[in-house]
Image (cartoon, rainbow, N blue to C red):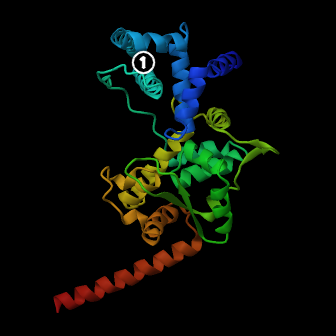
């Protein structure tokens, strides 16, 4: 976002009706979602005063509903995502001000090309091109399944930071966060202590790392690693985590739970991931899978193979007898 656009957005936020709405939905939406709604709503109200819009909506809700759907149709022809987010932002704004305007009808999702893939190896290549504290944060995201919103929650929650510090001497750290989905009453992830950076992460004394910083540094590192693609940001580290869990044969319920997806069960019946010992054992498969081979490990493996081969020879002899 350019400086001029940021200034215009700040002016828009100072409007009494917008400011009240943006503050009032803080308890129900994450900060990133609220800010996204704010941006799209500011574009919608580019040539209209929010107060005049609310007054018109109260006096003639049917006409306003038609106008909204017409605008959404125009946006849809350019970008389905823009149209959908604008619709959700508008419905939230109207609901907060208790103005009944029925914005009905679903916006059908057009078939789009598959999102760019983030391979574990490529993620590491990009991370290597970053400096601290970003290198530590991205490594943490890659090994935890958490996204930028969760990192920002840790950044801004002293209780979580204290909990992390209290577990520093443990081989792994359990980090409890706000549930991401309505079917979750509890949400946590488990990460090897070595991959958990110091929180809060700062670019310099007094300056906390924010989502915008992370996006900027990631793009620069991806270009340096010659792996930059549009749409391939730090959030895709979650994709690399999930794919790697599949390769390491981590139980799907645990892998999904650590991403905040409710253990892959949309109805909330799956509970095995809440067993910390079980979850740690399962995610431990990922840690083992990613650990580089050593001469000692190779020697042990060779010994085990020889023992198995000897057992096979004995069994074959007994079978023939």
- Residue 121 location in percent, x, y? 53, 48
- Residue 201 location in percent, x, y? 71, 48
Considering the image in quadrants, where does the C terminus appear?
A: bottom left
- Whether residue 208 appears in this view of the structure is yes
Q: Which residue is mark 1?
A: 79
Q: Residue at x 46, y 45 (%)?
A: 239
Q: Residue at x 50, y 38 (%)?
A: 29
Q: Is residue 3 left or right of residue 315?
A: right
Q: How many marks do you count on the picture? A: 1
Q: Quadrant of residue 220?
A: top right
Crowd rating for badge 1 (residues with CA inside 10 Å; few <14, some 14–19, many 20+): few
- Whether residue 71 appears in this view of the structure is no
Q: Is residue 274 above or below residue 89?
A: below
Q: Residue at x 62, y 45 (%)?
A: 152
Considering the image in quadrants, where does the N terminus appear?
A: top right
- Residue 249 location in percent, x, y? 38, 61
Q: Is residue 7 above or below residue 314?
A: above
């Amino acid at each position: 976002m350019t400086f001029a656009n940021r200034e215009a957005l700040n002016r828009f936020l100072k409007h009494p009706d917008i400011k009240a709405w943006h503050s009032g939905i803080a308890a129900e939406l994450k900060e990133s979602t609220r800010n996204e709604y704010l941006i799209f709503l500011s574009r919608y109200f580019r040539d209209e005063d929010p107060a005049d819009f609310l007054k018109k909506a109260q006096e003639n809700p049917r006409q306003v509903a038609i106008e909204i759907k017409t605008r959404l149709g125009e946006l849809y022809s350019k970008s389905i995502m823009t149209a959908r987010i604008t619709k959700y932002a508008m419905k939230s704004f109207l609901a907060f001000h208790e103005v009944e305007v029925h914005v009905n009808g679903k916006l059908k999702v057009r078939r789009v090309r598959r999102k760019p893939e983030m391979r574990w190896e490529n993620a590491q290549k990009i991370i290597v091109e970053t400096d601290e504290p970003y290198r530590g944060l991205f490594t943490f995201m890659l090994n935890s399944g958490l996204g930028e919103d969760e990192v920002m929650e840790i950044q801004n929650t002293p209780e979580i930071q204290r909990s992390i510090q209290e577990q520093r001497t443990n081989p792994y750290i359990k980090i409890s966060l706000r549930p991401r989905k309505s079917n979750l009453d509890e949400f946590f992830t488990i990460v090897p202590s070595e991959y958990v950076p110091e929180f809060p992460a700062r670019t310099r004394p007094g300056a906390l790392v924010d989502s915008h910083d992370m996006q900027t540094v990631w793009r620069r590192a991806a270009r340096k690693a010659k792996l930059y693609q549009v749409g391939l940001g730090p959030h895709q580290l979650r994709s690399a985590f999930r794919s790697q869990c599949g390769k390491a044969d981590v139980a799907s319920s645990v892998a999904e739970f650590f991403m905040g997806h409710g253990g892959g069960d949309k109805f909330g019946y799956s509970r095995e991931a809440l067993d910390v010992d079980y979850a740690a054992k399962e995610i431990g498969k990922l840690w083992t899978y990613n650990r580089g081979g050593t001469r000692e490990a190779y020697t042990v493996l060779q010994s085990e193979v020889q023992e198995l081969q000897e057992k096979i020879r004995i069994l074959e002899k007994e079978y023939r007898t």
